[in-house]
């Protein structure tokens, strides 16, 4: 048993993410061994709003970057779309 404890201590000291992974909890029980009901887990308020507040600006910035890069490529004649004169 002491060897397992020593290995866990070594891994947690040598790998910085091991401590983070080990401390994450996933609760599957709803009651204690005595039968008492555990309290409700914490709920993140405004989860969808927070996601949109992060996603929307990054999508907008990504769109601006790609638009400016496409204009730069076309300006330097690196990539210029061909004009098709097919009037079929």
Image: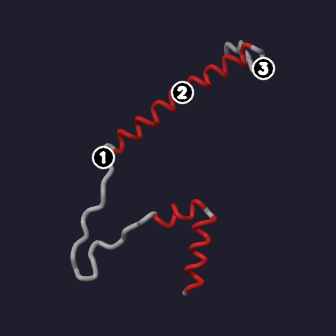
Q: Residues within 10 Å of mark 2 (few under 14, many from 20)?
A: few
Q: Which residue is mark 2?
A: 61
Specify which label sits upstream in the sequence, 3 or 1.
1
What residue would you read off at disc 3?
Answer: 78
Identify the colour scheme used.
secondary structure
Q: Earlier in the sequence, mark 2 or mark 3?
A: 2
Q: Quadrant of the C terminus?
A: top right
Query: Viewed as shown, does residue 76 lie left or right of 7?
Result: right
Q: Which residue is mark 1?
A: 45
The percent position of residue 9, horizontal first and vertical second, equals 57, 73
Instruction: Please tell me whether mark 3 or mark 1 is closer to you in this view.
Output: 1
Q: How many marks?
A: 3
Q: Kindly identify the residue that appears in the image at 37 percent across and 68 percent down.
A: 27
Front residue of 44 and 64: 44
Residue 51 vs residue 87, the one in the foreground: 51
In the image, what residue occupies the spot 57% across and 67% down?
12
- Residue 46 in percent (x, y) is at 31, 43
**Residue drawn at (22%, 80%) of the image:** 35
Q: Position of residue 62 (x, y in %)?
A: 56, 29
Are there few (<14), some (14-19), or many (20+) residues within 10 Å of tag 1?
few
Is the residue marked by circle 3 packed among few (<14), some (14-19), or many (20+) residues within 10 Å? few
Say the numbered circle drawn on residue 28. Answer: none
Circle 2 — which element? Answer: helix
Kindly give the residue lying farthest to the bottom in the view shown: 1
Mark 1 residue element:
loop
On the rendered image, what quadrant is the N terminus found in? bottom right
């Amino acid at each position: 048993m002491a060897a397992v404890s020593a290995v866990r201590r070594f891994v947690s000291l040598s790998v910085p993410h091991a401590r983070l992974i080990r401390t994450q909890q996933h609760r599957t029980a709803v009651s204690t061994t005595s039968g008492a009901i555990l309290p409700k887990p914490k709920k993140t308020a405004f989860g969808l709003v927070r996601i949109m507040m992060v996603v929307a600006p990054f999508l907008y910035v990504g769109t601006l970057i790609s638009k400016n890069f496409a204009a730069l490529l076309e300006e330097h004649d690196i990539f210029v779309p061909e004009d098709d004169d097919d009037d079929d």
